[in-house]
Image: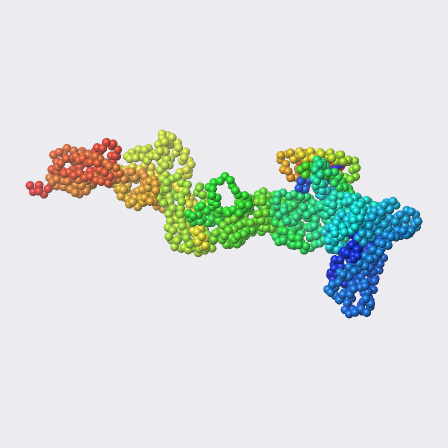
Amino acid sequence: MAVCIAVIAKENYPLYIRSVPSQNELKFHYTVHTSLDVVEEKVSAVGKSLADQRELYLGLLYPTEDYKVYGYVTNSKVKFVIVVDSSNTSLRDNEIRSMFRKLHNSFTDVMCNPFYNPGDPILSKAFNGIVSGMMVQTS
Amino acid sequence: MSVPDYMQCAEDHQTVLVVVQPVGIVPEDQFFKIYKRIASVSQVSIRDSQRLLYIRYRHHYLPENNEWGDFQTHRKVVGLVCITTCGAAKDWPQTAERFHGQKEVYSSTLYDSRLLVFGLQGEIAEQQRTDVAFYPSFEECADVERRVEDFVESIFIVLESKRLDRATDKSGDKIQLLCVPFEKKDFVGLDTDSRHYKKRCQGRMRKHVGDLCLQAGMLQDALVHYHMAVELLRAVNDFLWLGAALEGLCSASVIFHYPGGTAGKTAARKPSISQPADASKRHRPGALTANGISADTSTEIGRAKNCLSPEDIIDKYKEAISYYGKYKNAGVIELEACVKAVRVLAIQKRAREASEFLQNAVYINLGQLSEEEKIQRYSILSELYELIGFHRKSAFFKRVAAMQCVAPTIPEPGWRACYKLLLETLPGYSLSLDPKDFSKGSHRGWAAVQMRLLHELVYASRRMGNPGLSVRHLSFLLQTMLDFLSDQEKKEVTQSLENYTSKCPGGMEVITLSDGLKLPPVPFTKLPIVRSVKLLNLPASLRPHKVKCLLEQNVSTASPFIYSPIIMHNRGEERCKKIDFQWVQGDVCEVQLMVYNPMPYELRVENMGLLTSGVEFESLPAALSLPAESGLYPVTLVGVPRTAGNITVNGYHTSVFGVSSDCLLEGLPSVKTSGCLVEVIPSLPRLQLSTSLPRSAHTPQPMSKEQLSSSVSVQLFNGEEQQLTITLENIGSEDIESLELTSKTVNTKDKVFGRFLSWDLEEALRHLPLKPGQTVTLSISIKVKLDFSGQENLLPDLNDDGISVTGLPISSPLRQLLKPRAENKAVSSESGKAEYSHIKTLEAVLNFKYTGGAGKVEGYYRELSLGVHVDVEPSVFFTRVSTLPATSTRQCHLLLDIFNPTEHELTVSAKNSKDLVLHPSECQRLAIQVDKFDFESLPQLYQEPASFSSPKQLEEERQHAQGCQINSKLDICWSIISLQKASVEGALNQLVLEHMQLAPLQWDVLVNGKPCDCDVVADCKAGDAVTLEVKLTNLSKNAVGPLTLTVMPYQDFQNGVQNYDLDEAVAFVGSNTFFIDTVKPKESSVCEGALLFLYTGDFYLNMKVQDDSTPRELPLAWFTLPCVHIRALDTPLQAGA
């Protein structure tokens, strides 16, 4: 499944980023960071055509040699980015979509926490658990 | 063809390539000057036609690339301009030879060439050649441009002829097969007669003609040819050329759609690639300009038909690129096509599709690239990403390029280039090098990525050999990323920072890089973190006080409202708010900071001082060492203002890890402060005080400890007097010009009799002005006189002794309350255990007000306070006071029961009485004969109505005066052998007052006109009438009377028998009873009578007064008249008879 999951604030700084521990974390930071260009581009394109606004899933942002980067933008412009291994061909678009939906639900729970300040890094254990579930199992 | 030209853009397809090269020895700067002038001729309008010819100049072009000229004609070098110097005619042949040699390189494609010769003096024998121009020097070559234009025109003629030649060639049966270098061997032995081959030849030629048409400025024709070529080539599956035809079609369409060009500014960026500087200004045909429209309308219609729509352009580009992709050797072409497509997409603002092209470009393998080429490639990718607005991607590739500059495989890493590239990536990572941008709130950004970048900047700058830069970057890293560094990283960063600063200490100056980028200083506001800044007042003894001025009172209220619930201040205002105390010039002033250390280890802060403005301020830096993860830690920074005025504390400076930083408070919104502006007043002298008595820790209650500069304590017996010598030293730098001393008794419920503290300041004042370093001594006497009579437990009941005493027992409400006696005893035994409970405490504060120097002029003074703490032990008690009347009404006997509560032997002495020795805890009676007082006759000194407002005060003052008189009369003193003699006053005063006061009704008895009192014997002659005059003077406040005065003579037989039956012996002349009418205050009444003593003898007159007024309230004592003793003597006459 996913090798890196990131939540990025409206102002494009990371609220949460977690990657498979075995690999170079910084690389994923770079990957997610550069993917924001595409996200922004897609979001601004969506803005132009209002009809399409309800679709939060941005689809494949860009493929790299090893990974595929998928994006999702909430209505409050919080971005979710999921990086999956390119070799993992079993993943369908629908599965990615459901992962994002799950992530979004969990994120909504985090935001509902009265002790959470919007804009702070997400430290929620529940959220972490959801993410862990989506990350690839090293088995 | 291995070197791609990343600067290519679609419109380059319509240009002709001219190479400008130096031949022989040409100074580089001169060459480029000429090159620039040549390059300015980038488009030439051809005579007799409305076409424009575009020229692309290169000063360097690989012949290898030239070989692809047939494939895309704009890659073909068609013109050569050589620049050379030739000093003398004799060198000319050699120069010409070189020129020809240069021509050989591009000979296969060259249409025409020119040689520009500079610096030739004299004439050339050779005949005039059209392709050579001579100029005397690099400066005198005005017609270079014109010559280039001529040259371009000649190129055009060749181009046009070729175009026409090829275009009309199709009727010929044999068409030459154009091919790219790598194809050549593939076609060896191919059947040249096949239809397939012919079609291929046709298609390729058609495409070639299209290229030529495009170059020759015939866009319409080009489009037609390209379309035909596409059809032909598609049929024969000649993909490479199909791609080229498609690309040509795209280029032509782009030229049509975007006359402004697609290269944008990026084309002009790299001078090494030598795109003409004014490329973007080029005018394009096909645009709806006067130029284009003026052509016949048929072409216009045709254009619209053949031209691709913007969407189609991209599709065709995609197709072309996919065809190129089939050929490994066409990588450069593919890459360039991608770049061109991206530029077109950028114009169309279709960033996402552009990014797909770029993504594809990334994967195009060009075989083994040199490091420099890699750098170039990454840089260009970065630039293209920037172009389509993908700043992050751009930054990523720029960083990759930077890393490539210093790849380990490069023998000489270009750290400088790497650093420069890294700096360019900063905006992409939303990182600015100004720490001010980070001070607002919490950090928002990609910390991990940014930290990496900063680390790389640090490393690059260090390898560049600029430790100052690395210190700056490392400081920045530490300051801004502190929250994201792990403990281990913190340690590492600080260690390397210390290493760097040992070579190059970090400062606050702005570092300006060679390209003009300014690196602002990085103050370490987080090392340590300052939470609050508080300016401290001077210690109480040094605080300046303003001489009171009535006008001063209402200065501070700026608001017209007395009170408003709305507080209008904000933080900023609070900062500049003036603090309501003053600092003094030349005195050490303190500012307290609350700091804490966020580091996981001990933080050493050196040279921590204040930053101020306003007045000259000498900051005395402090060094501190904060423990790891310390809590709030108070730090006091000190300094000395050197001039007077308003001082503002702007911030503080520190030196941490060898980096000195100036932290300004305005940049630190999290710092709490209660104002930073304070007034500095001119210098004042300083006084130091030392005393002869030991210091004590006692402080009088209402004063706080800091208000007192020092305090002394002494233990005294009641009534004892002690001298306190105070030495005042001027330890300041100003003369003390005036000195005042006041005292205030504080915290006492007991009434103090007499002056507690007394002094004579005159002697000290004589030493003024007191120069710095000088001292003056002052002697103060401490005298305690307290009333201990309330201390019941110390009063043994004298009644137990069986001594009967007449008169009033000293009683207090307390005493009455404590009865019955049994209880009283119990209390006394209990309190006896609490040894010092009976000690009374007196406290006072001595205030020295002094001033001098410049501060005095401004009206300031200083106060030095000395607390005096006296524990008073009881000395003698007067347990009971009574009086016995003396023989005279004007005198009385005072009986005092004196108790010695001390542990010493006491000697009590009084006037007119012998000393009385009292052993510890002994009680004895002392009798003193004293004159009664007439208090009314006291001097009215203290009774000025102005000085005492309340009647109570008046009364007190009166009593005090009375007390003084009593004391002087009685002069009761006690002494303990070891101690000095001391007097007791006070306690006695009130008690004895009543007894010792003369009655307000004063009776004067005159016998024979002579005043007569108890002990005076009035002589008279028997038989003579003795006049008796009784005068009543009313000194009381009320009228008295009417009274009846009865005179009764009697004889005292001295054995207790008094004979009142003297009717025969004494005869009254008139009545023996007098009536005295009402006597008003201050008036007197006299009643006169006469007595006739018939016999000689001693007679007494008893006079009794009876008060006839209805309310008999006057005390009996008021009516005591003296007993008159009259001695009747024989008259000489009688004796004679």
Most foreground residue, A29 or B825: A29
Left/right of residue B281 with respect to residue B76 in the rendered view:
left
* Quadrant assignment, res B833: top left
* Quadrant assignment, res B671: top right
Left/right of residue B778 with respect to residue B426 in the rendered view:
left
Is the C terminus of chain B in the top left, top right, bottom left or bottom right quadrant? top left
Left/right of residue B671 with respect to residue B12 in the rendered view:
left
In the rendered view, tell whether residue B731 sits above or below residue B927.
Answer: below
Q: Can residue B924 be seen in this view?
A: no
Exactly how many numbered labels are in the figure? 0
* Quadrant assignment, res A131: top right
In the rendered view, tell whether residue B732 sits above or below residue B876.
Answer: below
User: At 75% across and 49% down in the image, what residue appears?
Assistant: B288
Q: Can residue B763 be seen in this view?
A: yes
User: At 53% across and 53% down in the image, what residue appears?
Assistant: B618
In the rendered view, tell whether residue B84 sits above or below residue B974.
Answer: below
| Residue extending farthest left | B1137
Coloration of the structure image? rainbow
Left/right of residue B368 with respect to residue B883 in the rendered view:
right
Give how far across and how far down residue B1042 sits, in percent: 21, 34
Give how far across and how far down residue B4 sits, in percent: 79, 51
Give how far across and how far down residue B940 sits, in percent: 29, 45
User: At 21% across and 40% down in the image, what residue appears?
Assistant: B1084
Most foreground residue, B890 or B384: B384
Most foreground residue, B730 or A115: A115
Most foreground residue, B711 or B35: B35
Give how far across and how far down residue B349 sits, in percent: 73, 45
